[in-house]
Amino acid sequence: MTDDLTRLARAVAEHLIARQQTVAVAESSAGGLISAALLAVPGASAYYLGGGVVYTGRALKGLLGVERGELEGMRSSSEPYAAFLAERMRRTLRADWGLAETGAAGPTGNVYGDAAGHSCLAVSGPTATVQTVETGSPDRGANMHVFAASALALLLQELERPGAG
């Protein structure tokens, strides 16, 4: 695990443990790095309820029970879709917080016209937010790392926001 992912995951873990809160993760183009970072922190069972790499429509239906009609007007790799995933994962696992990431890691863009390095992130819980990240890079591995770090940083931002506890 790289230093920045480890640092961010530890900071998230400290907040969650102190509040006795939990998180559930739905990630796509980060490929499991968000969950791996959170699980690398000793004591993760106190705050990490689970997660999934929701990379395909089959995974979306199988892991989260999402039916096609629930996504009316939404497309993957968008802020509304990320917010939907964060809230769905939070509710499915009955977590205090849901964290989601969806994007195009590269080396090429996705079928929706987003360039490689595009990711949408969302947090759902006592507070909520969405964010789009654009790296401008076709480097798949580097993008996955940036997406994971950005998602953890977004969750940390919300954990530090007044009203989050």
Image (cartoon, rainbow, N blue to C red):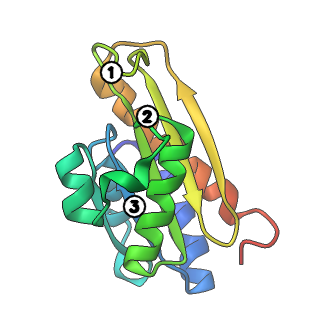
For residue 58, above or below residue 16: above
Farthest right residue in view: 162
**Residue beneath the point at 51% across and 64% down:** 87
Alpha carbons under labels 2 and 3: distance apart:
16 Å
Q: Secondary structure at mark 3?
A: strand
Alpha carbons under labels 1 and 2: distance apart:
9 Å
Instruction: Find residue 58 and name its label.
Output: none
Q: Please provide percent x and percent y for residue 45.
A: 34, 81
Query: Mark 3 highlights which residue?
Result: 25
**Residue beneath the point at 67% across and 65% down:** 159
Q: Amino acid at mark 3?
A: Val
Q: Amino acid at mark 2?
A: Ser
Q: Amino acid at mark 1?
A: Asn
Q: Secondary structure at mark 2?
A: loop
Image quadrant where residue 107 sits: top left
**Residue beneath the point at 34% across and 40% down:** 30
Q: Earlier in the sequence, mark 2 or mark 3?
A: 3
Q: Earlier in the sequence, mark 3 or mark 1?
A: 3
Query: Mark 1 highlights which residue?
Result: 110
For residue 47, above or below residue 55: below
- Whether residue 43 is visible, yes or no, is no
Q: Please provide percent x and percent y for residue 16.
A: 56, 75
Query: Mark 2 highlights which residue?
Result: 77
Q: Is disc 1 in contact with disc 2, using a CB cutoff of under 8 Å?
A: yes
Relative side of 84 to 164, left or right: left
Q: Tell us which disc is closer to us: 3 or 1.
A: 1
Q: Please provide percent x and percent y for residue 110.
A: 33, 21
Q: Earlier in the sequence, mark 1 or mark 2?
A: 2
